[in-house]
Amino acid sequence: MKLAVIATVAGKDLQEIFRDRLLFSLAFLMPVSMMLLLGFGLSLDVENLPLGVLDYDRSAASREYINEFASSRSFDFQSELTNPTELEQALMGGDLRVALVIPPNFGKNVEAGRRVQVQSIVDGVSPSRAQIIKGYVLATNQAATTKVVSTLLARRGIDPTSITTPLTVEMRYLYNQSLKSIWSLAPKLIMLITMMTAPYLTALVVVREKETGSIYNIYTSTVTRAEYLIGKMLPQVAIASLNAFVLTILAMKLFGAPFKGDPLFYAISTLVYVLCTTGIGLVVSVFVKTQVAAQIVTPIVTMIPAVLYSGVMTPIESLTSSAQVVAHSLPAMYYANIVIGSFLKGVGSRALGGDLAVLTVYALTLQFVGFLLFHKRNAS
């Protein structure tokens, strides 16, 4: 194996990437663009939900109850509605996500200590968001109920804390105290974007030579299979590693995600993950013969599994048992664990060594399979 030959093949690829606008954009502009678009456009926070109220009572007690919702950051109080038709139209048009219907004699029944039912109507188009809204409504209603009961008991000379709050729970959030979804999302985007762009570029670069016929020069030359593939993969690994570094800086500086882990362990893990992703591109390039085919096949085998089975949108624990098996058979989930552990939890090789070991096996297997499947043959 001659290093000069490998350097020549790698240098030729780099020249092609810098000379071709499409390849240059895929290599350097697309990862950053995707980070910006997804980072600013994709949010898992459910806040400032448009809230409307149909108040049939219009008493001091009902206004106090409404204020409890209006003062919550979870809801954005829009207006008081006048009739059920207006409420239905506001929900159908998307102007409201949740509405409260306060019954007549609300204040009198509360003063008398009788049970009162307030109707909550939630836009259920998105089931996951509807479940979150339900939790917000129940929590805010509980706070309002406690305040109302405390006020009634105080008027009667009874210490309200002994009855309304005999047990209390002190909640503490670890690793992401402010519950900012972007702190969790930005590190996972590093995993997702690397999985989408690195195999795509690798497959295109190799398949392009097949389609143009320039690969026949390699077939008839003295360049060995190992020299050719190593020379092909080196630029892709370097570019993907550089992009991962840039995405990490964007996650920290632009989106504010704190990095608490071991930089060396994270760098090694990222390099191994890059070898996984470029290995996938190499394997794809062996089976397809045109750039169009590479453009179709690569996203199917990389982007879709990475989105669905890595924990980006849905926690792995919430997937079905068969889906969890699929998730554990793909490298994306293991690197997602590493980036989250490195950024938010501040853990390193002791906690995440198993994930790195699995990624290493993936990387070696994919690169080896790509090497075995690629055959150097004559032009004839």
Image (tube, grey):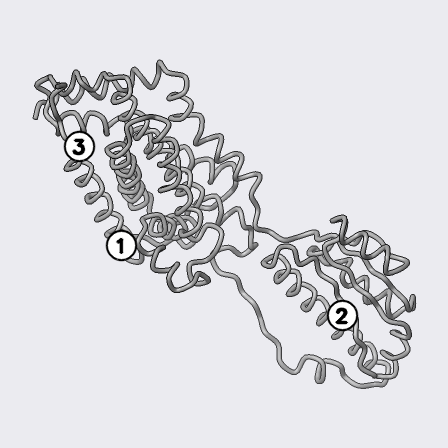
Front residue of 99 and 166: 99
Up/down of 207 relative to 72, above or below:
above
Mark count: 3
Question: Residue 144's mark?
Answer: 2
Residue farthest front in this picture = 380
Counting from the top left corner in percent of width and height, residue 36 is at 52, 34
Q: Amino acid at mark 3?
A: Phe
Residue plotted at (10% across, 25% down)? 224
Residue plotted at (18% across, 20% down)? 7
Gap between marks 3 and 1, in whole Å? 32 Å
Q: What quarter of the picture does the C terminus occupy?
A: top left
Residue plotted at (26% across, 56% down)? 354
- Earlier in the chain: of badge 3 and badge 2, it is 2
Front residue of 81 and 298: 298
Front residue of 380 and 142: 380
Question: Residue 353's mark?
Answer: 1
Q: Amino acid at mark 1?
A: Gly
Pointer 3 with pointer 1, Cβ within 8 A: no
- Earlier in the chain: of badge 3 and badge 1, it is 1
Determine the secondary structure under disc 3: loop
Front residue of 161 and 211: 211
Label 1 neighbour load within 10 Å: few <14, some 14-19, many 20+: some
Up/down of 78 relative to 18, above or below:
below
Up/down of 294 relative to 176, above or below:
above
Question: Residue 374's mark?
Answer: 3
Counting from the top left corner in percent of width and height, residue 166 is at 65, 83
